[in-house]
Image: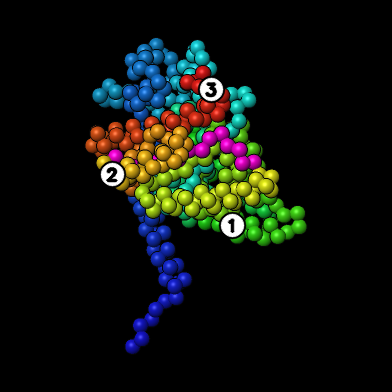
Amino acid sequence: MTQYIPRIDQLVGQHAQKLSERLQAHRAELFPPDARKELRRFTSGEAAELLGVKDAYLRKLHLDGKGPSPEIRSNGRRFYSPGDVQALRVLLESGAKSPGTYLPGRRDGDHLQVITVINFKGGSGKTTTAAHLAQKMALDGYRVLAVDLDPQASLSALHGFQPEFDLLDGGTLYDAIRYDDPVPLSQVVQKTYFTNLDIIPGNLDLMEFEHETPRALMQPNGNLFFTRIGEVLSTVEQDYDVVVMDCPPQLGFLTMSALSAATAVLVTVHPQMLDVMSMCQFLLMVSNLLGVVSEAGGDMSYDWLRYVVTRYEPGDGPQNQMVSFMRSMFGDHVLNHPVLKSTAISDAGLTKQTLYEVEKHQFTRSTYERAMESLNAVNGEIEALVQSSWGRHNGA
């Protein structure tokens, strides 16, 4: 008897349906249907560290009746919500000697900083890097817009959006950059549970831009595809200090448009030979294609470009050799600090969270602190580059 073998499109469709249903059930277990993700409260010590002050100073503010009132738990410890931390920033900034001490974002004349996070190869830690960067900058007082340009939508999932359930009627950047009847960008911006952080989620609709652009280019007076993202970002630029764009792991029209809109580029690199070889091919393609875009009138001037080493294992000899090789090749274009490979980061991802969201007591203290120190060091370097692009050095 001949065994029935379903067509590949039917089989894949069945698998996708089963997986989607299971993911939805998993999300319902983590977050009830009517619930939205909420960011945990921070201990007074964590809040003080975010603000750059002493815990004792926050206690004095509370006792003096200044600023928001923290939650006092049974053990007498004080906990602050993300909104409380922002309110404290505003309070402290009003009495600061230097502008930008507690509110480090744009001032008059500063341009919107648009950071594209890119890599040709999956598994380089691109989305993890983009998510932690966007969240840390929001925690540090910047007004941040995260844009998920990857149809796989991992950045969206980390922030509580499951595309096949939450974005049935659109709601991605594609709606704002499509060639026929685009909507205002403000209509697809979503609030997140992080104070200061908004997001434009992604889903498979983004692939339509890849399919439609060749047809648009063939029309008389064809549209300049590479200007579309920059043009729509300009409509909301007064609302943000920084945009972080998580690009797909391919060099298509979306990525090229994102690179044209960018003021800065962050390339994630896993320090292994195959990954570095892949990056070499990626850089050659970027150079060739963006050269064409430049000749067509695209703005290819950037404030900075940096390579960030990700999933780094300090005890791995070959990885250390690759890092040394990269530093000898690219010099200061490689960030000083790498993102360590850590079970704390990967375990947090199992519950669709980042390290900035989870409670430290869920991990071995040394594991958590080592991973957090690594992320903060990388993000601190990037924040310094942003400040420098605005003409500020050492916070001045």
Marks 2 and 1, the one that precedes in the sequence: 1
Marks 2 and 3, the one that precedes in the sequence: 2
Q: Residue furthest right?
A: 220
Of helix, strand and loop, which mostly describes the magenta segment?
Answer: loop
Under mark 3, the amino acid is: Arg
Marks 3 and 1, the one that precedes in the sequence: 1
Q: Residue furthest bottom?
A: 1
Q: Is residue 234 left or right of residue 7?
A: right
**Residue drawn 70% across the image and 52% down it:** 223
Q: Local crowd at mark 1 within 10 Å, few (<14), some, or many (≥20)?
A: some
Q: Which numbered tag is attached to residue 143?
A: none
Q: Is residue 180 above or below residue 191?
A: below
Q: Classify the position of the N terminus by image quarter.
A: bottom left
Q: Local crowd at mark 3 within 10 Å, few (<14), some, or many (≥20)?
A: few
Residue bounds of the magenta highlight: 299-314
Instruction: Indicate the position of residue 233 as horizontal and vertical percent values.
Output: 61, 40
Q: Nearer the viewer, residue 94 or 247?
A: 247
Under mark 1, the amino acid is: Glu
Mark 2–mark 3 Cα distance, whole angstroms, equals 38 Å
Mark 2–mark 1 Cα distance, whole angstroms, equals 41 Å
Q: Which residue is mark 2?
A: 317
Q: Which residue is mark 1?
A: 210
Q: Which residue is mark 3?
A: 392
Under mark 2, the amino acid is: Gly
Mark 3 or 1, closer to the camera: 3
Q: Quadrant of residue 341?
A: top left
Q: Is residue 357 visible?
A: no
